[in-house]
Image (cartoon, rainbow, N blue to C red):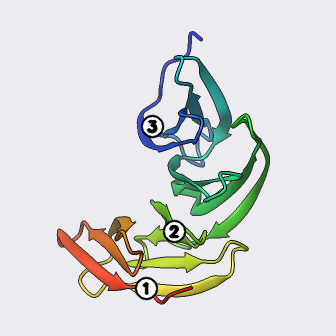
Amino acid sequence: MSERFKGLNDLTPHADESIMFTDQGQTGLQDPTGPVWRLHKDGHLNKLISTRPSPNDLVLNTAQTHLYVAMTRSCEVWRFLVRPDAFVAKAQWFARAPAGLVGLAMDTVDRLYILNPGHGCVWVMDPHGVPLHRVQSQTGRMTTNCGLTPDERSLVITESETGSILISEIPPP
């Protein structure tokens, strides 16, 4: 397609065996040209989203009907309707976290975990964007990545300011 990647970052698999991934590079509010791509298992490549300010992490909800993308430098999470063929439609702003956000995780009941390094925490949102919990780092402010334990009772968080791995119990849904 005669276009180079800007700087590949994160990915999420789709049930159809395609992979959706962000191409953040140095994009941001000054250059809102960061795309999100879909690589099909046959090697075909589609640009799903273009002209976005710093698409970083991304996750699909459990039903794979919505794609959530962390727009790091605009401090927002955007949600897109994903059609059955995995193309995106109807973009909307889902959440905003002042002082930046970098990563996302999703549990099996579609609670979205938003890493907010500016505040040294992780926000837990319900599927409608209602804040449920705030998990605060006790060691530093740079919460950079997270994942759930297999039983989804605990959230494991990396905190890059101190180089710590943090574990926090999560209330059940």
* Element at label 2: loop
Quarter assignment of residue 63: bottom right
Q: Position of residue 136 (x, y in %)?
A: 38, 86
- Of 127 and 31, the residue lying toward us: 127
Q: Amino acid at mark 3?
A: Gly
Instruction: Tell me, yes or no, whether the two marked residues, 1 and 2, touch with CB atoms within 8 Å.
Output: yes
Q: Is residue 49 left or right of residue 10?
A: right
Classify 82 as above or below 131: above
Q: Nearer the viewer, residue 145 or 84?
A: 84
Q: Secondary structure at mark 1?
A: loop
Residue depicted at x 77% and y 57% = 92
The three-letter amino acid code for the residue at tag 2 is Asp
Q: Which residue is mark 2?
A: 107
Few, some or many C-alpha atoms within 10 Å of disc 3 (few <14, some 14-19, many ≥20)? some
Q: Please name the residue shown 56% across and 73% down the image.
A: 98
Tell me the residue that label 1 is attached to.
170
The residue type indicated by label 1 comes to Ile
Q: Pick out the residue farthest to the left.
A: 163
Q: Which residue is mark 3?
A: 25
Dot 3 or dot 2: first in sequence order is 3
Question: Is label 1 in contact with label 3 (beta carbons under 8 Å)?
Answer: no
Task: State which mark lies toward you, 3 or 2.
Answer: 2
Q: Nearer the viewer, mark 1 or mark 3?
A: 1
Q: Could you say where residue 33 lies in the image, as x and y percent from the top left?
A: 61, 35
Give the vertical position of 58 relative to 6 (above or below).
below
Residue 36 in percent (x, y) is at: 59, 37
